[in-house]
Amino acid sequence: MAAAKKVADDAKAAQQKEVNKLRAVQNKLAAELAKAKNFRVTLEQQRQLALLEESNAVTATKTPNQFKVWPNKGFTGRSTIRSTEAIRIKAVAFAKKQVLARKPYIWGAQGPNAFDCSGLVYAAYKDAGLGYPAWGRLNAALYFVATKRVPFSELVPGDLLFYSYDGSVQNIHHITIYAGNGMMWEANSRKVGLIYSNMYSIKGLMPSGGRV
C-alpha cells in the first residue's frame, strides 16, 4: 500500500514539475508581451502554451469551490485596442459559422477543421483581418495580457471572455467570444464541442472581459 502511494506521489510530483516549467515559459512570455510591440511565439512555445492550457482545463474540472470573482488579475492588459467594430463583427460571424458547422474540439487545433478554445479565438480574428505583429497564436492566459480590460457594462460582440478557476491570470483555463445579450461562442471541450452558450455557464464563474 505504501509503495503504491509513493509511486502515485512521485508521478504527481513529476507532473507538477512539468506544469511549473510550462508556467515559467508562459510567465516569461507574458512579461515580454506586456512590453513588446512586435511579438512572435515560436512553434515550440505554442506547443508548450497549449499543453499548459490543457493542464489548466483539466485541473479546473477537478477543482471544487472555484472562485466566482477575480481576486488577483495580475497583468492589467493593453492600454489600447487593435480591432474595429467591423473586425469584431466579422470575428463573431466566423465563430458562429464554425459552431453551426459542428466542427470538433481538438487540443491545440486552430482550424480549419477543428479548434480548441484559444484556437477558435485566434482563427476568428485572423479571418477578420488581423495578422502579425498585431495578432498571433497564443493561449488563453496570454490573450488576457494581449487585450484591453473591458467592464461587463461595456461588453460588445467580439470581445473576449476569460475564465480562471482560481482567479489568477496564470491559471486562466478557458477563453470565449462574446456574442451579445449575455451569450458567447466557444470551443468548449472534447465532449461538448463548439457551442453557443450563456457566459455564466462555465461552472457559474465570473469571466473577465477583454477587447482585441
Image: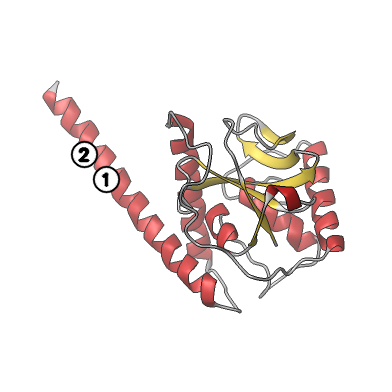
Secondary structure of the residue carrying numbered label 2: helix
| 60 in relation to 157, above or below | above
Task: Using the image, tell me which numbered label, if any, was put on residue 60.
Answer: none
| Coloration of the structure image | secondary structure
Point out residue 201 in the picture as x, y percentages from the top left corner: 65, 31
Give the image quarter of residue 163: top right
Name the residue carrying label 2: 10
Nearer to the camera, 168 or 47: 168
Give me the residue at 59% from left, 31% from top. Answer: 204
| 125 in relation to 82, above or below | above
- Identity, as a three-letter code, of the amino acid under mark 2: Asp
Point out residue 119 in the picture as x, y percentages from the top left corner: 65, 52
Q: 26 left or right of 94?
A: left
Instruction: Using a 10 Å C-alpha cutoff, classify the residue at mark 1 as few (fewer than 14 neighbours), some (14 to 19) or many (20 or more).
Output: few
Q: 165 left or right of 192?
A: left
Give me the residue at 52% from left, 76% from top. Answer: 35
Name the residue carrying label 1: 14
Q: Residue furthest bottom?
A: 37
Nearer to the camera, 82 or 61: 82
Point out residue 205 in the picture as x, y percentages from the top left corner: 57, 36
Q: Residue furthest top?
A: 1
Question: How far is disc 1 from disc 2 in space, using C-alphas?
Answer: 6 Å
